[in-house]
Image (spheres, grey):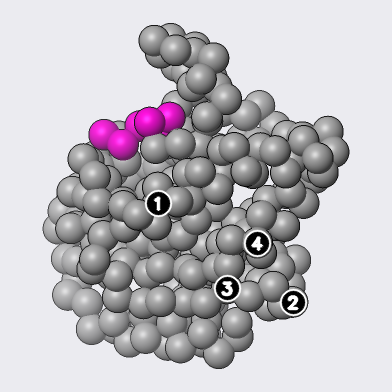
Amino acid sequence: MEDQVDRLVRKTWEKYQQLPTSKRFLIAVAGIPGSGKTTLASIVASRLNALHAENAPAFSNIPIAAFIPLDGYHLTRSQLSALPDPSTAHARRGAAFTFDASAYLALVKKLRAPICPESKTIYAPSFDHAVKDPIADDIPVAPTIKVCVFEGNYVALNKDEWAEATLLMDEIWWVEVDENVARERLVRRHVKAGIAKDEEEAGQRADENDLVNGREIIEGRVDIVREWIVSREDEGWKPEAHKQYGKPLNC
C-alpha cells in the first residue's frame, strides 16, 4: 500500500501547487464497502497537510486538505422511518436510496465554485456512530482548503445526482478489492461496532446488504476513473497502521 499512497500524495501535492488561487482540487475516492477507501482518503488528506506544514511552517496550523466522507449524507433514522417502506429502508441502510444525494451534490457545487476574497467557510455533515445518525455542519471547509478528498460508496455512481457530482470532480479514484477480503473486513467491523452481535450475524448483514450494494456500485460505476488502487489484506490496509496520520477510520 505504501508505494501507492506515496505516489498519489506526490501527484496531488504537485496538482495543489499548480492550482490558481480561486480553485480547489476535488477528488472522489470510491469503492465497495470494505474496500479501504476511507483509510486511503483520510491518509492522503492528512499527508498533504503534513507536507504543507513542512513546506510552510509559518502556516502549519492552517490545513490545505479536507477529508469529507459520504457517511454524513446518510438519511437519519427518522427520515428512514418516514419512507414508504420503513422496514426495508432500515434493513437496507447503506444502499444508495438511503442517502441524501441532492444535499451531497449541493455541497460539491459549493466547493466547485471559485474561491473569492469574500468566501466563507462551508460546512459538511459527519456521522456519529454512537447515535447512528449524521451531525449537520460538523466538518468545516475554510477558504484556505484547496484539496477536498471525498470518499464513499456512491461518489463514482453513474446515476442521478451522483453522476452530476462526478462531473464536477477533478479526479475519480477507485479502490479495487477482492470481495472475500471485503467481506472479512466487514464482518470484523460490524462486530466491533456493535452492529452485529457475532460473526454469523455480521456475515449475514455483509451478504444481504453491504455486498449487494457493492455489486450495484461496481455495475453502475462511471467510466472516467483516473486512478485504480488495489487494496490487499496486508498491514498497510489496516487503519491502525496509520495512527500517525490521524484518527483510525473504518475501511
Instruction: Say whether marks 1 and 2 touch (CB < 8 Å).
Output: no
- Residue where numbered disc 4 is placed: 180
Q: Is residue 56 left or right of residue 36?
A: left
What residue is shown with label 3? 231
Identify the image quadrant of the N terminus.
Answer: bottom right
Choose the circle earlier in sequence order: 1 or 2: 1
State the SS at label 2.
helix
State which mark lies toward you, 4 or 1. 4
Left or right of 81: which side holds 169? Answer: left
- The residue mark sitting in front, 2 or 4, is 4
The residues tagged by marks 2 and 4 sit, at their Cα atoms, a distance apart of 17 Å
Task: Decide which of 231, 193 is in the foreground and name it.
Answer: 231
Q: Residue at x 43, y 82 (%)?
A: 8
Which mark sits nearer the N-terminus, 2 or 4? 4
Say which quarter of the image contains residue 207: top right
Residue type at mark 1: give it: Ile
Magenta span covers which residues?
A: 97-102
Could you tell me the amino acid type at mark 2? Glu
Crowding around mark 1 (Cα neighbors within 10 Å: few <14, some 14 to 19, many 20+) is: many
Give amino acid for label 4. Asn
Rendered location of residue 147, percent (x, y) = 35, 67
**Which residue matches tag 1?**
217
Mark closest to the chain's N terminus, 4 or 1: 4
126 shown above or below 248: above
Q: CA distance from mark 1 to mark 2?
A: 26 Å
The answer to the question of whether label 2 and label 4 lie on touching residues, with beta carbons closer than 8 A, is no
Q: CA distance from mark 3 to mark 1?
A: 16 Å
Q: Secondary structure at mark 4?
A: helix
